[in-house]
Image (cartoon, rainbow, N blue to C red):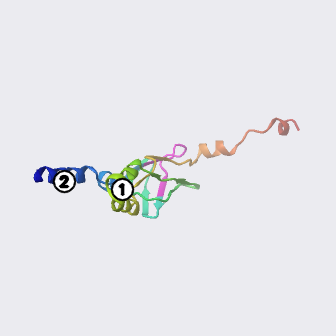
Amino acid sequence: MRISILATIFIVSIFSGCASVTTGQNQSLSVETPGCPAASCKLSNDKGTWFVASTPGTVTVNRAYGDMNVTCEKGDAKAITQFKSNTKGMAFGNVLLGGVIGAGVDVATGAAYDYPPVLSVDLRCGANAAAASQAPASPAAASK
């Protein structure tokens, strides 16, 4: 009887793990700039700063509650985009199964949060930038 109780406690403690145990504090993100390939990008949040030398590219970042700020550049073209972090559903389950301490650890380390797996930045360069800047004339302006 005592062995089965200890075994049950052991199994429950293993499988009730928190987000930091199941998915960790890091997340791999893909960064793309469809309108301007081969751009360089800087990603930053309150846990650090990371770089992608050439898009499309992948980088591993630290998860955090705050937004992921992404700045991409190529030549004279520059775009800045923010991506919101989302609380993972697993974080709420952790309150029930892992307790307040486990949930607190996940929130503090950022393990309770996720960013979108693909960060698409609307950077336009070269022919794409020229096409975007040439808006068609309105019919009223064309008839004058």
Determine whether, in the image, residue 121 is placed left or right of residue 23: right
Disc number lying in front (1 or 2): 2
Determine whether, in the image, residue 22 is placed left or right of residue 72: left
> Which residue reaches farthest front?
1
- Provide the secondary structure element on which disc 2 rests: helix
Amino acid on which disc 1 is placed: Asn
> Splitting the image into 4 quarters, where does residue 20 fall?
bottom left
Tell me the residue that label 2 is attached to. 10
Q: Residue at x 40, y 55 (%)?
A: 112
Range of residues picked out in magenta: 30-42
Q: Pick whichever, 68 or 55, lies toward us.
A: 68
* Image x and y of residue 99, in percent: 34, 58
Q: Residues within 10 Å of mark 2 (few under 14, many from 20)?
A: few
- Label 1, label 2: how far apart the Cα atoms are: 27 Å
| Magenta stretch holds residue 131 | no
- Tell me, for residue 26, which label it has, or none: 1
Q: Earlier in the sequence, mark 1 or mark 2?
A: 2
Q: Pick whichever, 111 or 99, lies toward us.
A: 99
Amino acid on which disc 2 is placed: Phe
Q: Residue at x 39, y 57 (%)?
A: 61
> Which residue reaches farthest right?
144
- Tell me, for residue 129, which label it has, or none: none
- Provide the secondary structure element on which disc 1 rests: strand
Determine whether, in the image, residue 120 is placed left or right of residue 28: right
Q: Residues within 10 Å of mark 1 (few under 14, many from 20)?
A: some
Q: Residue at x 46, y 47 (%)?
A: 116
* Image x and y of residue 94, in percent: 35, 53
